[in-house]
Amino acid sequence: MTNAIKGVTAMPRIQGKPNVPGSAFRQIIALRPEIAKPWNALDEAMRFTGVLDAGLKEEVRRMVARHSGCLFCASLGAPQDSYDDPRWAAAVAFGKAVATDPTAVSEDDWQALQAHFSDEEIVELTAWIAFMFASEMIGAVMKLEPATPELKTMYTNWIRNGIEKAARAAS
């Protein structure tokens, strides 16, 4: 498959377990079940539980994906251009700053975050960004291809179902 942006052919460097449902990432990481099981469980827990809204975390993931080099991750959706909610704007800006250079997060970036989030929320957001960047780094190293339309639909449904389940659990 050709990446029109970079003009290169993206072929996964490692073929994962073909009988594992889901993405090439899940199939590749399944080659090491003792890693895959806790990794996937942590993904579910961080993505759909916690003090932060799962939709906000997905939007931050989309921004981080723009900077990770993972074609698959970036193909799952682009972040919005702007945000009416200042919390979302601050979280996405922080995600971009961390993904660009975590050592260069400015005091202005930090103060904007603290204006809208508690320490507990900042810890969760920072852990989420770090976990997503780690996942996306694997995708970049393995040269995962952009998602097929079927995988995009499957991902969208998984996110929607997870957000609905989290909302039910919170009420």
Image: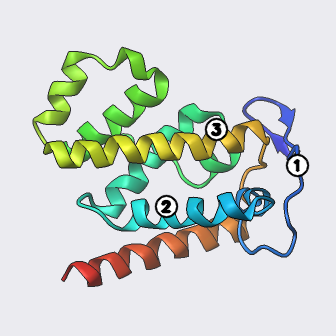
Alpha-carbon neighbours of circle 1 within 10 Å: few (<14), some, or many (≥20)? some
> What amino acid is at disc 1?
Ile
Percent x, y of residue 105:
33, 20
Q: Which residue is mark 3?
A: 137
Q: Amino acid at mark 2?
A: Leu
Q: Quadrant of residue 56?
A: bottom left
Task: Tell me residue 14's x, y (percent).
Answer: 88, 49
Q: Is residue 62 above or below residue 156?
A: above
* Colouring chosen for the image of the structure: rainbow
Res 151 quadrant in image: bottom right
Mark linked to residue 14:
1
> In terms of secondary structure, where does tag 2 sit?
helix
Q: Which residue position is annotated with label 2?
A: 42
Q: Position of residue 129 (x, y in %)?
A: 43, 42
In the rendered structure, the answer to whether residue 49 lies left or right of residue 139 reads: left
Q: Amino acid at mark 3?
A: Met
Mark 2 surroundings: few (<14), some (14-19) or many (≥20) residues within 10 A: few
Residue at image coords 85%, 76%: 19
Task: Please report whichever mark, 3 or 2, sits nearer to the chain's N-terminal start.
Answer: 2
Secondary structure of the residue carrying numbered label 3: helix
Looking at the image, residue 69 lies above or below residue 57: above
Mark 3 and mark 1: span between their CA atoms? 14 Å
Residue 79 in view here: no
Q: Position of residue 84 (x, y in %)?
A: 21, 47
Observer-nearest of 8 and 4: 8
Tell me the element at label 1: loop
Q: CA distance from mark 3 to mark 2?
A: 16 Å
